[in-house]
Image: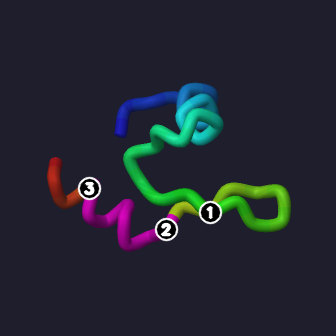
């Protein structure tokens, strides 16, 4: 995706991630199906 971990956390905080992210038990989990769709577009 070409973005840093710090920038991704900023996107998560503002709700602007390019994939679905679920906060679970203090961690953020990326929904695999949304990540695959994003990567297929490249």
**Is the residue under label 2 in contact with that under label 3 (CB below 8 Å)?**
no
- What's the magenta region? 31-38
Q: Is residue 26 left or right of residue 37?
A: right
Cα–Cα gap, marks 3 and 2: 13 Å
Instruction: Write down the residue under mark 2.
Output: 31
Which badge, 1 or 3, comes first in the chain's sequence?
A: 1
Residue located 44% across and 70% down the image: 32
The overriding secondary structure of the stretch rendered in magenta is helix
**Is the residue under label 2 in contact with that under label 1 (CB below 8 Å)?**
yes
Determine whether 39 is above or below 31 in the image. above
Which badge, 1 or 2, comes first in the chain's sequence?
A: 1
Which badge, 3 or 2, comes first in the chain's sequence?
A: 2
Coordinates of residue 37 in the picture (x, y in percent): 26, 64
Of residue 41 and residue 2, the one placed in the foreground of this image is: 41
Determine whether 5 is above or below 32 in the image. above
Here the colouring is: rainbow
Cα–Cα gap, marks 1 and 3: 19 Å
Question: How many C-alpha atoms fall within 10 Å of the one at disc 2: few (<14), some, or many (≥20)?
Answer: few
Residue located 16% across and 48% down the image: 42
Q: SS for tag 3?
A: helix
Coordinates of residue 14 in the picture (x, y in percent): 58, 34
Instruction: Write down the residue under mark 1.
Output: 22
Q: SS for tag 1?
A: strand
Q: SS for tag 2?
A: loop
Tell me the quadrant of the picture where the N terminus can be found. top left
Instruction: Write down the residue under mark 3.
Output: 39
The total number of labels drawn is 3
Question: How many C-alpha atoms fall within 10 Å of the one at disc 1: few (<14), some, or many (≥20)?
Answer: few
Coordinates of residue 15 in the picture (x, y in percent): 54, 42
- State which mark lies toward you, 3 or 2: 2
Determine whether 40 is above or below 13 in the image. below
Question: In the current view of this chain or complex, which residue is farthest to the right?
Answer: 25
């Amino acid at each position: 995706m070409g973005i840093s971990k710090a920038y991704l956390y900023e996107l998560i905080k503002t709700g602007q991630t390019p994939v679905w992210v679920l906060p679970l038990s203090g961690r953020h989990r990326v929904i695999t199906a949304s990540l695959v769709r994003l990567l297929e577009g490249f």
